[in-house]
Image: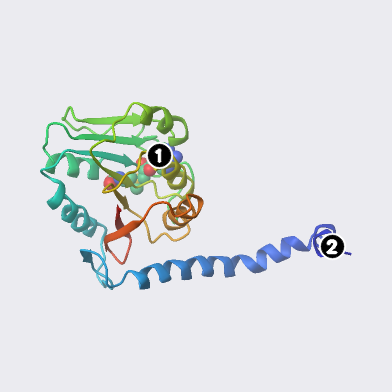
């Protein structure tokens, strides 16, 4: 009997899946380590290996980018806003009148569990962050329902900063494909949980593969041992 009818009939595929899954996870992890090794001498900021990585270190990467961008008109798009800490940071440092800051979120938390966080983590009970700034706008809804239509009415002609902070593979991959037609040289992509190698990192790898490596993403920097990573488009 050929192999796959045999596996199907005997239901041995179940055992095969169980046995092989750990190898698949290790493989993905090794892909991420390869990325780190390739970029170890690159970037304007890179703290690898940092024994005292803490979440607040992510401001070092964002503030480094903001040093260059604070006096320029920018369009900042954030996917995954929660309490709004980072969109607040960007809009309070970049004070240019024409800049725009758009944040997308369900404001009901994660649609799936991620690492040690359960579905619904980051739930804001539907409330937007309180930011008193006319240039800042929030879009409530699942990305899969809200991003496509909203982006049709958004502007992309100035330098754009896309902050991908949804944590999940599914959400990140969806957003990457939605912003893909809007991307142009000098735009910046920031990932907030890049070292989550089976989520944001994996989504980015698949996105690059599926777009035929059309874009050259130059590594700009990373903090917290590549947890937060930024790229600029060439
Ligand atoms: C880590 S939090 C964002 C943190 C925020 N950027 C900051 O800097 O403090 C991740 C957010 O992504 C949102 N999210 C993830 N997947 C989503 C989806 N498919 N649609 C809408 N929101 C999503 C969650 O609701 C959650 O608030």
On the image, the x and y values in percent for residue 17 come to 68, 63
Residue 149 falls in which quadrant of the image?
Answer: top left
Which residue occupies the extreme right position in the image?
A: 1
* Res 164 visible: yes
Q: Quadrant of the N terminus?
A: bottom right
Which numbered tag is attached to residue 103? Answer: none
- The residue sitting at 46% across, 42% down in the picture is 174
On the image, the x and y values in percent for residue 215 come to 38, 52
Q: Nearer the viewer, residue 190 or 59?
A: 190
- Left or right: 93 as drawn, with respect to 180: left
Residue 120 falls in which quadrant of the image?
Answer: top left
- Left or right: 46 as drawn, with respect to 227: left
Element carrying mark 1: helix
Q: Is residue 29 above or below residue 233?
A: below
Residue at which label 1 appears: 181
Q: Nearer the viewer, residue 138 or 75?
A: 75
Give the image quadrant in which the ligand numbered 1 is located: top left
Residue at which label 2 appears: 6
Figure disc tally: 2
- The residue sitting at 20% across, 63% down in the picture is 44
- The residue sitting at 47% across, 67% down in the picture is 31
Q: Is residue 65 above or below residue 174?
A: below
Spatial separation of the CA atoms under disc 2 and disc 1:
44 Å
Q: Residues within 10 Å of mark 2 (few under 14, many from 20)?
A: few
Q: Residues within 10 Å of mark 1 (few under 14, many from 20)?
A: few
Q: Earlier in the sequence, mark 2 or mark 1?
A: 2
Q: Is residue 170 above or below residue 108?
A: below
On the image, the x and y values in percent for residue 160 come to 26, 42
Q: Nearer the viewer, residue 29 or 126?
A: 29
């Amino acid at each position: 009997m050929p192999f796959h009818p045999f596996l199907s009939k005997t239901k041995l595929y179940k055992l095969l899946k169980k046995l092989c899954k750990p190898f698949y996870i290790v493989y993905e992890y090794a892909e991420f380590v390869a990325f780190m090794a390739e970029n170890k001498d690159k970037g304007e900021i890179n703290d690898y290996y940092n024994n005292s990585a803490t979440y607040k270190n992510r401001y070092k990467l964002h503030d480094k980018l903001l040093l260059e961008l604070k006096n320029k008109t920018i369009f900042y798009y954030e996917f995954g806003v929660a309490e709004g800490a980072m969109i607040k940071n960007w809009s309070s440092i970049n004070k240019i009148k024409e800049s725009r800051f758009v944040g997308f979120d369900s404001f009901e938390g994660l649609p799936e569990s991620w690492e040690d966080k359960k579905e619904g983590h980051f739930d804001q009970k539907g409330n937007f962050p309180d930011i008193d700034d006319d240039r800042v706008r929030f879009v409530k809804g699942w990305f899969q329902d809200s991003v496509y239509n909203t982006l049709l009415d958004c502007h992309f002609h100035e330098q754009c900063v896309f902050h991908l902070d949804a944590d999940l593979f599914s959400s990140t991959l969806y957003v990457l494909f939605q912003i893909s037609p809007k991307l142009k040289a000098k735009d910046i992509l920031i990932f907030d949980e890049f070292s989550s190698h089976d989520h944001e990192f994996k989504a980015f790898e698949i996105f690059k593969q599926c777009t035929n490596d059309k874009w050259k993403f130059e590594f700009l920097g990373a903090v917290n041992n590549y947890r937060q990573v930024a790229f600029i488009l060439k």
